[in-house]
Structures are given as structure tokens and as C-alpha cells.
Amino acid sequence: MLSDEVSSALWTLHSGWLGAELAHQWRRHLQEQVDWQQPTVQVYGRRHPVPRLTTFLAEEGLRYRYSGTVHNGEGWPLWFRPLLDRVNEACDVRFNGCLLNLYRNGDDRMGWHADDEPEIDQQCPIASLSLGGSRDFVLRERAALKRKVSLQLSDGDLLVMHPGCQQRWMHSLPTRRRVLSTRINLTFRCFQSA
Ligand SMILES: O=C(O)CCC(=O)C(=O)O
Ligand SMILES: [Mn+2]
């Protein structure tokens, strides 16, 4: 794989994996083509809109419950295949689903979590592609909560979280009040087939 690599045993960051021009084209395309939603989640009995926009693309028939919403795969859109093929090739994996997040500015965020649900095949990596404005992505080790690693994810970066990462580390995308730009993030995953 080209580009600069920063690695730990459990993740690899490929900076600038997608060149600036392609990253720009894909960001615009996704921003316009995708049916972005703002689902609500129930917290202590009250419903709140999630602090970001989101959507799900996947092979037909795939069902995934995430953040209180059931996502149904409707088949990969044709226009999305070139990007999917590139990510599949880079990771030597055939991903069957992708969760997309749009952070409108630095107020939008994602809290601490790990993508360790039983529906996700934990032998498969999770590939996370960032497009648009840079944001801090913070990892925290479960066994030593004070041990944190902050990665800056920028336009065109591909972060690969290897098997074991979700079991040993949690991650979040904290608020950054000074960030005014929009960021899109795509996390490619392998779901267990029904
Ligand atoms: O936006 C990001 O970089 C993180 C997204 C994420 O963790 C997720 O979709 O599960
Ligand atoms: Mn995640």
C-alpha cells in the first residue's frame, strides 16, 4: 500500500491513501447521492437525535441494528462499487456492509464505543475512510482506561482496525468546537451472514 503508515499491532493508519482529487470527488458525490438521516436514540427514557448524520449501504438482505436503528442492506449502489472495490483490494477482504457518518462541523461527534457487536465478524478488519475536514479520533485501552492514543484523521486517510482492536480498545470522535468543516467517514465491515 502506498502512503505514510503509522502502525500499532492493532491498527494501521495509511495517510493520504486516497489522493486529494479522488477524495474531493468522492466526498462531493457522497454528500449529494446519499440519503443522509439523523436517527434518534433513547437515553434514560428520552429520545435524542444522534449528533451526526448517518446512512448504511450493504449487500442486499443484510440486517444490522446500530444506535437504536435497524439498517437493511438494499444492495451496493452501482456508483459506489469503484470505491468499495478499492477498499476491498487494499485490505484483501470482501466487505459486505458500510456505515457512513457525516459530521456537519466540530459539534457533531461519536461517543466511546467499540464495534464489537456479535453481528460483526471479528476475524475481519474494519476499514475506516475519512473524507473532508480533519478530526481527532481517540482510542482508549479497555484494560488501562487512562491509556489513550489520539490519531488525526484527514482527507483521504484509511485507518484499518485489525482483528482484536475492538476487544482491547474503545474509540470515539470527540467534539472539536473550532472545527467548521464537514467530514464524511465510511466504516467498511464484514457482517456475519444470516
Ligand atoms: O468517524 C469516525 O472516524 C468513527 C466512526 C465510527 O467509529 C463508527 O462508525 O463506528
Ligand atoms: Mn466505531
Image (cartoon, helix red, strand yellow):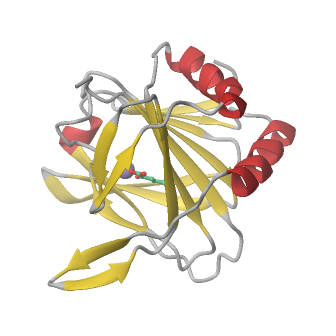
Say if 49 sits above or below 99 in the image.
Answer: below
Screen quadrant of the N terminus: top right
In which quadrant of the rendered view does residue 95 lie? top left
Whether residue 178 is visible, yes or no, is yes
Q: Residue furthest right?
A: 21
Question: Observer-nearest residue: 137 or 84?
Answer: 84
Give x and y (percent) for residue 29.
77, 48
Q: Residue at x 57, y 54 (%)?
A: 152
Left or right, residue 91 beside residue 49: right
Quarter of the image holding residue 167? Answer: top left
Say how many tags the image has: 0
Q: Residue at x 37, y 49 (%)?
A: 71
Image coordinates of residue 122 in percent, x first then y, are 24, 28
Rendered residue at 64%/52% (across/down): 34
Q: Quadrant of residue 32?
A: bottom right
Residue at (46% x, 17% y) in the render:
94
Q: Is residue 107 left or right of residue 116?
A: right
Look at the picture and state if 86 lies above or below 169. Answer: above
Q: Is residue 128 above or below residue 190?
A: below
Residue 106 appears left or right of 45: right
